[in-house]
Every structure is written in structure tokens, then in C-alpha cells.
Image (cartoon, rainbow, N blue to C red):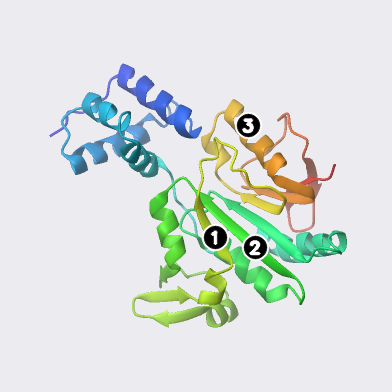
Amino acid sequence: MLETSFFTDTDFTRYRTLVYNESGIHFTTTNRSILESRIKEQLREKHIGSVQDYYTLITNDKAELQNFLDSITTNLTRFFRNQAHFDMLQDYVVPELMKFKKDNHTIKIWSAGCSTGEEPYTIAMVLQNILPLPWHFEIIASDLSLKCLMVGKEGFYSDNQVEGIPSNYLTKYFDHVAGGYKIHKDLVSKVRFDYHNLKHDPGFRNFDVVFCRNVIIYFDEVAQVEVINRFWQAMSLKSFLFIGHSESLFGMDTQFEFVKTKWGTLYQKSV
């Protein structure tokens, strides 16, 4: 059994530096216990006796490093999380884009930090429900967790996970199957799940909307600015950025403009 003192200050510094360099996620002394608990779980699962041996393993094996990074990510999500954002998407963002994109009827969206897929599928349901022909949409959903991406690609959710989905959406876009609900194939085909580490440039470009909610709170100020500026590069003119309700670009050196609507606030790339 591991001792409570198994994780020294030196170990903490080594691990949090590795995590930061690989992902941009910043562990402070305040949330040190989260990192410790995730490492304990990995040691038990892999039957490794010391944090030093585990550190050697993950720094010499890319697959094990990916598994470790996967284990420390927080994947709290649900369908229609923060309903006001989807009201804003439907009643403000989409009409604005339709006025601007008169010669291009495709709306491109990036759900960054998509977790198990509830966010991108919510976006897909809203857009599928409101866009008239010849308009259509494309969604790229990315995450650091390969396990979460596999859940999203499968498109199956338990009875508890679909709570909060309006009944008309649930009936229209899901099939009730054993143990839960399966998203219709035509909607699944509208979402492309892709592994991506926000610390790096994805090479994506010309997005009209980017959702990155409750992700940058795990980064320090330097990494936050880098991520937000990479979003800027990936977005088209007159595009919109959604971040979490507890997140803000206030005081950050970015070119995004703050936009206030009756449904809530968001940011726009207008120049």
C-alpha cells in the first residue's frame, strides 16, 4: 500500500512541469491533491511501486504518456450545458453569420475540449434544427483524451446522460436502445472527432464559431494567451468565440472584441 508521503515536493515539481510542457495544464499547490490522486490510480492500475519508476515510464513511452495525460483531464460535461450559450448561437450568432456569409453557405464550428461529445452534438442538433437549405454546417470536435473521443464517436449515452435534452430534440435525433440512447447516424456524420492538444497549432483554419468552454481555467496566464491567439489564427473574419461563464479575456492581450447580447456575452473576431 502506498504511503501518504509517497509524493514529495520534488516529485510534484517534476510531474507538474511535465504536464505543463506537454499540455499547458497548470497544477498549483492548491490542486496538487488532484495530480497526486491520479498518479496513485495509475500506479495501482499498472502495479508500479514508485512515482520515480512511473515517471521514467511515461517519459520514455509516448503511449503511456498519452494515457497519463488522459487520466488527469477533467471531463465534466452534459448536453445543453449553459443553455444561454445555445440560445445565443441560435438567435444571435447564426443570424449574424447568415447575413455576412452570403456567398458561402457553410458554417464551420470547432468544439475545442469536447470531452465525450455532448457539446458538439448539442451544437449539431441546434444547427440541424434551424438552418434552412442551402445552408449546412461542419463541426470538428477535439480533445486531449482519446477515451473521451471514442465515446463521442460512438454516440451512445445512458438515460442519465440525456437528461436536460428537450423532448423534441431527444425524439428527433436519438433512438432509444438498450441501456440508453443512440444519436442518429446522419447527425453523427456531421461531427468529426479528432485528437488535439491545445498547446499546439492544430492547422485548422476558417472557423466561423469556436466553443472552448471551461478549458482555459486549467491553464496559467501565459498558456491562456497562447491558446486564445491560436484560436484567432484558426478563425475567419466576423467569427465568434464562446468561453465558459467563469472565464474571461479581460486584461488579456488579444484582438477579440467583447460582445454583449440579451442572452449573454461572447467574443468576436471582427477585424
Residue at image position (71%, 30%) is 252
**Whole-Å distance between the Cαs marked 3 and 2?**
25 Å
* Crowd band around label 1 with a 10 angstrom C-alpha radius: few (<14), some (14–19), many (20+): some
Residue, disc 3: 226
Q: Is residue 267 visible?
A: no
Q: Identify the element where label 2 is drawn.
A: strand
Q: Nearer the viewer, mark 1 or mark 3?
A: 1
| Residue 14 in the image, given as x and y percentages of width and height | 36, 21
Q: Are marks 1 and 2 in contact (CB under 8 Å)?
A: yes
Q: Quadrant of the N terminus?
A: top left
Q: Quadrant of the C terminus?
A: top right
* 33 on left or right of 221: left
| Residue 13 in the image, given as x and y percentages of width and height | 38, 20
* Residue toward you, 203 or 185: 203
Q: Are marks 1 and 3 in contact (CB under 8 Å)?
A: no
* Crowd band around label 3 with a 10 angstrom C-alpha radius: few (<14), some (14–19), many (20+): some
Q: Earlier in the sequence, mark 1 or mark 3?
A: 1
Q: Is residue 108 visible?
A: yes
Task: Tell me the amino acid under the disc marked 1.
Answer: Arg
Residue at image position (46%, 58%) is 116
* Crowd band around label 2 with a 10 angstrom C-alpha radius: few (<14), some (14–19), many (20+): some
Most distant residue in the left direction: 1
Task: Tell me the amino acid under the disc marked 3.
Answer: Glu
Q: Which mark is residue 138?
A: 2
Q: State the image quarter where residue 219 is shown.
A: top right
Q: Earlier in the sequence, mark 1 or mark 2?
A: 2
Residue at image position (63%, 31%) is 226
Most distant residue in the top direction: 10
**Whole-Å distance between the Cαs marked 1 and 3?**
24 Å
* Residue toward you, 188 or 75: 188
Q: Earlier in the sequence, mark 3 or mark 2?
A: 2
